[in-house]
Amino acid sequence: MSVSVIQDFNQTIPIDQVGVEERVSRLNKRSIKKESKLQALKLALSMIDHTTLEGKDSKGKVIQLCSKAKMPYAPMPDLPSVAAVCVYPNMVATAKKALRDTAVKVASVATAFPSGMAQLGIKLDDTRYAVSEGADEIDMVISRGEFLKGNYTFIFDEIAAIKEVCGEAHLKVILETGELETLENVRKASDIAMYAGADFIKTSTGKISPAATQPVTLVMLEAIRDFYRKTGTMVGMKPAGGIRKAKEALQYLVLVRETLGSAWLSPDWFRFGASSLTNDLLMQIVKQETGVYQSINYFSND
Amino acid sequence: MADRIEVLKTYKTYVGGKFPRSESDRTYRITDGKDNHIANACRCSRKDVRDAVLASRSAFGGWYARTAYNRGQVLYRIAEMLEGRKDQFVNELKLSGVKQKVALNEVHTAIDRLIYFAGWTDKISQVFGTVNPVASAHFNFSSPDATGVVGIIAPDEHPLLSVISLIAPVIATGNTCVLLASETNPLPAVSFGEVLHASDVPGGVVNILTGYRNETVETLTSHKDINALLLASRDIETGKLADENASLSVKRVVQYRAEDWFSGEHENPYLVLEFMETKTTWHPVGA
Amino acid sequence: MSDINTKEPIDKANNGSPKPTSPNADRKLDFASFWEYSPAPENSDHVEIDERYNHFINGEFVEPVKGRYMKSINPANEEVLCEFAEGTSEDVDRAVKAARKAYEKTWSKISGKERGKYIFRLARIIQERARELAITETIDGGKPIRESRDVDVPLAAAHFFYYAGWADKLNYAFPGRKPKSIGVCGQIIPWNFPILMLAWKIAPALATGNTVVLKPAESTPVTALKFAEICRDAGLPAGVVNIVTGAGTTGSEIVNHPDVNKIAFTGSTIVGKIIQKSVAGTGKKITLELGGKGPNIVFEDAPLDQAVEGIVNAIFFNQGHVCCAGSRLLVQEGIADRLIQKLKDRMETLIVGDPLDKNTDIGAINSKAQYDRILEYLDIGVNEGAEMYQSSCSIPDNGYFCRPTIFTNVSQSNRIVQEEIFGPVLTIQTFRTPEEAIEKANNTPYGLASGVWTDKGSKIFKVGQAVRSGVIWSNTYNKFDPTSPFGGYKESGIGREGGLHGLYPYIKF
């Protein structure tokens, strides 16, 4: 894209927080019932990046996670698989092997996740390693310290450099919005990431509270919309962290539907970074199909 | 026979900061009640009303934009000027048959009343404005705001005191006005125009017309560029006509029939508020 | 396991549903082709609406003296909802006498504290019956249940709560003065916010010690009659609140009744002027809350996405049947195209249809008469040379429904810019400087409400001060609160409702 299209990141796009919250609250009033609910629950399931990002992660745990990802609920084999599993770089090979011959992607965090407090060279190596291990998608973090300093060029260049070493792998850029604090910063970071080549923009690492929130997600979706209008390029969205309930997932889908429209209602363009959400979606799906309220004891906790 | 022939004043109107004669060029005779000639006053027409409203509207923006502190000073300045011309007004009031003591009291009360309202200019929003604790993430406040051009119909009694009691609360907060002076006792009002002219009141803020009521009231009360009416005439029919005509453009109408213009009850911020709109502003509170 | 693994990725991802459309070359957003919301109708089984309603006078439901009834229509399906009494001079006289007696004998005698407790009861019972009232409002008037449930009814209860607390504190409301009640208040309310306007009228009147004869609009009388039941159940002394139903002639009987001390009217400017004229020379106090043609001014430094939402709230809230609607969008030239594009996108997501469906954004136009009037204005706009754009949503076959509509290429002299349409119809003009925006905003006989959108604080104060209207919504629109005074400059009315200022029309010194 030509340089003239890129906006001046020193300019701030005004965003009114109260207005954003009101919009979210209005969208939350959408009542999703019957067929539309079942459809959305399954759609949400198919959009999950089933995630484990802990220091104590083991190969065994990752393998379990992958089998859940492939077939979330054995009694209903026709349910979709989730979109991806998301792991640390040293677990990519394990996951890749467990998911071979399936449509489930392997995503890896990289770039000194979660803090991003390392030199660019190390971040590039981290990324190269994850890609070489077979990662289909890279979830990088931005350098929030540099961002808050106002060093936007640094952020842009770093993302562009990572994108370059990703090769075929899709790049998700984690803004860690909980550390950016204002919605104007969220918007600015979204724009920088998209112009620097992000395939997805993602709210959070899950290690900082608050993680994903709907107001933040709405602002990012609006950034994606404006970027699409301006450049014709679609960028995906991934809220991550703190989304545990099916009801919230549906609320996020409403945000997507009414901000970006139908084209984004696909795992190609929207993901949930979550772990416990999978089971709640499954419980709700089974409830919808059978009419009986479910207990977590009947769903494997992988 | 006096040693010297006195120079008599031609009473004109006060419109847009000037002293024009009526465009109709007509006058009528003002007497002391015993048919002794005092002066000729302008017999204004509907076109004079038109011109006065136009002047009043033109002056509104500037007067309204003044700071409250400045308007207070201007009102105080009127009082100062009046104090200096006390004798003139006492003599003028006496011409209509009022005794010296009563006339002097009227002038004194009028001066003090001006000072009373001068003090309200920068307090009215503080006393009658509010911050409203709305149940949402908004800062919300209300403050009084001048309504615009006010048409005033003065009574016949106490032609200086009543005129000042009516004009001061109206202009204190940024309104401008067109005053129809008493038909029988218009002279102090016209002379008051000269005081206004000498006291930093911008032209057009106060406009004073004289003449026959039946030739001006209809035009004044129905004029669509007037926002509010203040009627102190005792004539019930005029009051009703004003109410009816006000409905043409939803004017605010205040029927203000005083028994005793000397009473302290006329020193009253609620009268000021009658010519103010409450403006309420909302703004989100967020980061 | 193996069968899962061999499934096609695309099928898996979309669980057999049609795949969403891929992006078009022209960068359009498509909001309709995938994942339709299923109907989500509010259950109205438990709501009882009588076949016939009578006046509520002196604490009882009484048949009209002349025995005549009118019909209320559900505008969403054009079916008769119920019958209600047509008030004649005899009925009004009975109601005024009851109100006078209640004023003299009970209401003006009891303490403010006890008055307040009655009003608190009304607030509580409104909350208890909130769902029923919301559904009734929606069925009778056509407004979306989302609004009647989340706005009209909660705000109505909040108004009673707010003014209940004033009843024993009136001596603090008017510095230097002791307020007294006026007597019998005649109150006439419109059809756009029936229960809410009732609350705006009755709550301050009762708190200040007055009694009331209220007439709801002839197309939306039912919630007022349910409120009459609430007054009865709250044990409110007989005659303190009287509800007389009927059309304009009933209203004029109230206005012209010699024993009514005060008239409060909300409705059109045309009727407001007639009322102001009718009470001429009587000394009756009046408050009028009339029409508007609210300018909604968007500067280029505004938070645009929130401004779009504000524009939508300003003109499409309650089908645009809002006196303070932001019906004239004034947008700074440099952002006009972008803003209008965003607005059009947003309009595509508005759902027009069954008012009882919880997902409906825009319900039914309140009556056939209003529907015809709006359609007439659409014709006028087109004939004036304006460019009309409507969202592509589907609308039901029966009932009175109008798609959200915007007009561009309009000029200040166009009738659609000058006249209040009272429907989901927005005109869009551009401006270049703040001075031009202010001039256009003020170039109207109305002065009820305005919107100002900019991120620059000093500009908000400058423009907000210069625009002559009773409410300035800066970076927001169509917000209401019982503590916040509401009312217009110029031909938009006289007096304020809500807040401390809302007490003033109901007292004398």
Image: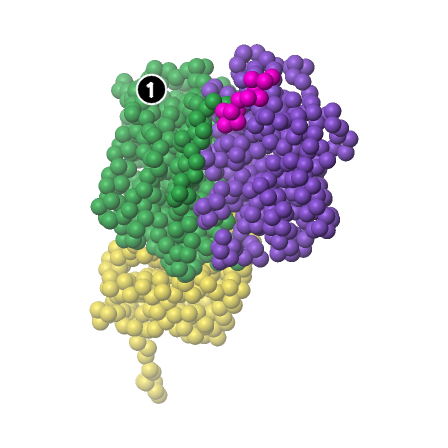
Specify the principal SS of the magenta part: helix
Q: Position of residue C188 (x, y in %)?
A: 36, 33
Numbered marks: total: 1
Residue at position x 66%, y 26% from top? A98
Residue C5 is covered by the magenta coloring: yes
In the image, C457 versus B56, the foreground residue is C457
Specify the colour of chain C.
Answer: green
In the image, C203 versus B186, the foreground residue is C203
Residue lying furthest bottom:
B3
Q: Quadrant of the N terminus of chain C?
A: top right
* Quarter of image, res B29: bottom left
Q: For the residue carrying disc 1, how many other residues have a C-alpha within 10 Å: few (<14), some (14-19), or many (20+)? A: some
Which contiguous range is marked in magenta?
C1-13
Residue at position x 62%, y 53% from top? A157
Chain painted in purple in the figure: A
List the residue tagged with mark 1: C81
Specify the colour of chain B.
Answer: yellow
* Quarter of image, res A111: top right
- Give the SS element for disc 1: strand
Q: Is residue B224 above or below residue C161?
A: below
Q: Position of residue C293 (x, y in %)?
A: 35, 46
In the image, B261 versus C288, the foreground residue is C288
In the image, C244 versus A128, the foreground residue is A128
Residue at position x 67%, y 18% from top? A300
Residue B76 lies left or right of residue A169; in this view the side is: left
Residue C131 lies left or right of residue C431; in this view the side is: right
Q: Is residue C111 visible in the rendered structure shown here?
A: no
Q: Is residue C1 visible in the rendered structure shown here?
A: yes
Q: Is residue B81 above or below residue C28?
A: below
Q: Amino acid at mark 1?
A: Leu
